[in-house]
Image: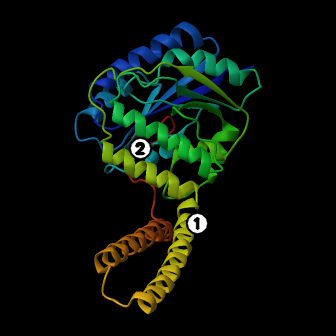
Amino acid sequence: MSKKSLTVVVPAYNEEEAVPSFYRELMRIYEGSLKEKLDIEVLFIDDGSGDNTLSEIRKLNESDDRVHYVSFSRNFGKEAAIYAGMENAAGDYVVIMDADLQDPPALLPQMYEAIASGAYDCVGSRRVSRKGEPPIRSFFARQFYKLMAKISQAEIVDGARDYQMMNKKVVNAILSMGEYNRFSKGIFGWVGFRKKWLEYENIERAAGETKWSFWQLVMYAMDGIVAFSTAPLVLSSVMGIVFCIIAFLAIIFIIVRTLIFGDPTSGWPSMACIVILVSGVQLLGIGVLGQYMAKTYLETKNRPKYLVGEAKLSDKEIM
C-alpha cells in the first residue's frame, strides 16, 4: 500500500526572513516523525510580496523538488492565498500554516494521527493564551469571538487559527464555496464535519513584523460578521421600529404639553439633539445595508479570487 501524501500550504506576504526558518523547522519535524508515514509537498503562496520572499522560495524550490509555489500578480490577501493553496494542493491531506512559525510544526504529528485514525475529518488549532499581543487587540479579539458565537450559525471558536489539517473531503467542500468575499474561519466552521481541536500557548513570530494593523483586523472582523450573519440588518430594522415609536410618543408629549402649558418653543436644544441622534441611527442603518450591498455587488462581478504571476507546481510550470 502506497503512502499517503500531505500538502503544507504556506501563505506568505513579505516573509523573506521567516521563510528559511519555517522550512528548516517544518522539515525537522517531518524527518523526525512523519517521513515514514507520509510523503510531503510544501506549497508556498506568495501573496504579491514586495521584498525578497519569492527569491527565498525559488531557492528552496531549486534545492528541494518537494517545494512548489504560486506567486500572485499582486497582493490579493490571505484569504485568496488560502484558497489558491487548497485549489492547487496535490496531497491526500492539506494543512494550512503561516510562515512566521506562530503555527507550531510540532503539532503536525498529532494532527496526522487524529485524521489517520478515521475518527476525524479535520483537526484545528486554537490559542489558549494571547501572550505577547497588545492588550487592546486581545480584548477586541475576544469580544469578536463572543459576538460571532451569538449571531452566527458557523462554529467560530475563540482563539481559532487558520492552522488546521483536513482530508480531501473537507478540502473539496471548502472549495465548493466559491464566494469572492471569503472569511476562512467562518467557512471552516460552516462546512462542519468531524473536527478535533488542539490547544497551545501563543507563540511570537520567528522573524519580521505582523502585517495586520488594528484597523485591518477591524475590517476583517466586519467582513466575517457580514459574511456569516444577517444580525446587523435585523438590528437596524429593530432600531428603526424603536425610534419610530419613540418619535410618535414624543409628538404626543409635545402636543399635550403645548395644549396645557403653551410655550411651544421651549425644549428646542433637546429636540435638536434627538434629531441628530436619530439621523445618526439612520446613517448607521444605511451603512449596514451598504456593507451587504457592496459584498453582493462584488460577488456579481464574478472576478477571479487571484491572478497568478508565476508558479512552479509538481506537474506544471507557469511563468
Question: Image height check: is 107 above or below 310?
Answer: above
From the top left corner, tell me how far across and down residue 59 is, in percent: 31, 26
Mark number for residue 78? 2
Give the amino acid type for the residue marked by disc 2 in the picture.
Answer: Lys
Question: Image height check: is 136 above or below 32?
Answer: below
**In terms of sequence position, does the residue under pointer 1 or pointer 2 come before the other?**
2
Q: Are marks 1 and 2 in contact (CB under 8 Å)?
A: no
Mark number for residue 18? none
From the top left corner, tell me how far across and down residue 154 is, in percent: 63, 47
From the top left corner, tell me how far across and down residue 204 is, in percent: 36, 21
Question: Image height check: is 109 above or below 270?
Answer: above
> Could you say which is closer to the camera, residue 202 or residue 83?
202
Number of labelled discs? 2
Q: Residue at x 70, y 42 (%)?
A: 192
From the top left corner, tell me how far across and down residue 51 is, in percent: 22, 36
Q: Residue furthest top?
A: 32
The quadrant of the image that shows the N terminus is top right
Q: Residue at x 41, y 43 (%)?
A: 78
Q: Residue furthest front?
A: 261
Q: Could one spot residue 313 in this view of the protein?
A: yes
